Amino acid sequence: MILLKNGRQINESNELVAVDLLVKDGIIIKMTECIENTEAQVYDLAGKLVSPGLIDVHVHLREPGYERKETIETGTKAAARGGYTTIAAMANTIPVPDSMESVTYIEGLLQQSAQVRVFPYAAITLGERGQEIVDVEALSETSILGFSDDGRGIQEAGVMYQAMQRAKAVNKPIVAHCEDDSLLFGGYLHDGEYAKANGHRGILSVSESAQIARDIMLAQATGVHYHICHISTKESVELVRFAKAQGINVTAEVSPHHLILCDTDIVNDDPNFKMNPPLRADADRIACVQGLLDGTIDVIATDHAPHHEDEKAWGIETAPFGIVGLETAFPLMYTTFVKTGKMTLKQLIDCMSTKPATIFNLPYGKLEVGAVADITIIDLDKEMEIDSTQFLSKGKNTPFNGYRVAGWPVMTLVGGKVTYKDEQVN
Ligand SMILES: NC(=O)N[C@@H](CC(=O)O)C(=O)O
Ligand SMILES: [Zn+2]
Ligand SMILES: [Zn+2]
């Protein structure tokens, strides 16, 4: 048994109230203001926030295939340090999880090395090549969260339509990276002020929004749960708002970097500001924030995309797209939006835990008696500079290095088991 004493939880009215939690056999069995128990191992939380474990539905663990960038072990250790108890692993690995054999293989690797709960995605198409659809029916019987070709858009409407029909029939979501390749024109940064001023080829906003518009119509026609990855443009947000008003089964995620940074924040062509979709204009960033606040955008996902420093050293034009996010998401969001009064703490926890569980039908994201003890303890007052050399992730590729932020996760429990604890908790 574990007894968490002197914590504080956020109630429905966004107030911090005192709470003790008693955990037995991986379940929260008691939650009241003051619990005494002589048999349990006791941790004194000294007023720190007790949150339902954070959930990230968009993570690149890189293993199998790209262990130089990240492994299941390092990626899930980073997740635990970031306060995450459940994550979903994207399918752009080698092999791509596009068959029973490859998904079973990846499930085995996860079982061996994962430090938090991990649900893999299966690809939508064989090899993520966008042509032949995977065996949706068979794969739906595995532990997958849904189907995704993340890293690439599905170029053909007919392929997406059929994939959606089949995913709907087995009650699994289609999780879409939206990008029309025919609208890329060799771009690698947002087609905006920074690219123009510095002679870079731009990525048009319509390369994302045009495909979202198409997919929303296909989602309406098929009734599938269609989840949009890393939304980044104001037009995309407007489309999701429209779709939801029509009752179409659409959800969307946004990443912390698209809420905090815009293209003009890029410094000296630093490849750590390069990701897909790119940092957009400030008006896009503002639309994403507004969309998150009004519920148009459902959840925050990191799109944790570690790359090796050798690869990022190729320079902004040729370096791979992607930045890490697991170990900085909560403090960045808390400092930028909650401490400044733009968002309540309850809203932030909803977007990072409760809502991801709800939209993906997971039995987590709850802090109550009888719930699984997936718990994150956060020190809202702990302020510290982001230092990528301290990351447990192999990826050090962050544009936020040196940012001074507060609200650091200090202890993470998955099913009642401590998976991360910093030295100040005991
Ligand atoms: N987001 C990125 O910039 N990169 C991701 C792919 C993706 O999420 O589209 C990656 O796998 O590196
Ligand atoms: Zn993507
Ligand atoms: Zn991704």
Image (spheres, rainbow, N blue to C red):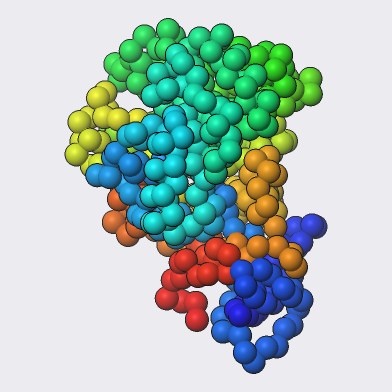
Task: Determine the image quadrant of residue 278.
Answer: top left
Instruction: Residue 219: give x, y in percent of width and height.
Output: 67, 19
Task: Determine the image quadrant of residue 2.
Answer: bottom right
In the rendered structure, the answer to whether residue 335 lies left or right of residue 268 reads right
Residue drawn at x 72%, y 26% is 249
Front residue of 87/137: it is 137
Residue drawn at x 51%, y 9% is 156
Residue drawn at x 42%, y 76% is 423
Instruction: Residue 86: give x, y in percent of width and height.
Output: 54, 52
Residue drawn at x 57%, y 19% is 163
Front residue of 398/85: it is 85
Instruction: Residue 63: give x, y in percent of width and height.
Output: 34, 43
| 128 over 155 or under it: above or below | below
| 183 over 73 or under it: above or below | above
Task: Work out whether residue 32 can be spotted.
Answer: yes
In the rendered structure, the answer to whether residue 331 lies left or right of residue 307 reads right
| 288 over 411 or under it: above or below | above
| 224 over 392 or under it: above or below | above
Q: Residue furthest bottom?
A: 38
Which quadrant, please, contains the N terminus? bottom right
In the rendered structure, the answer to whether residue 183 lies left or right of residue 335 reads left
In the rendered structure, the answer to whether residue 292 lies left or right of residue 109 reads right
Instruction: Residue 273: give x, y in percent of width and height.
Output: 36, 34
Task: Work out whether residue 51 can be spotted.
Answer: no
| Total marks placed | 0
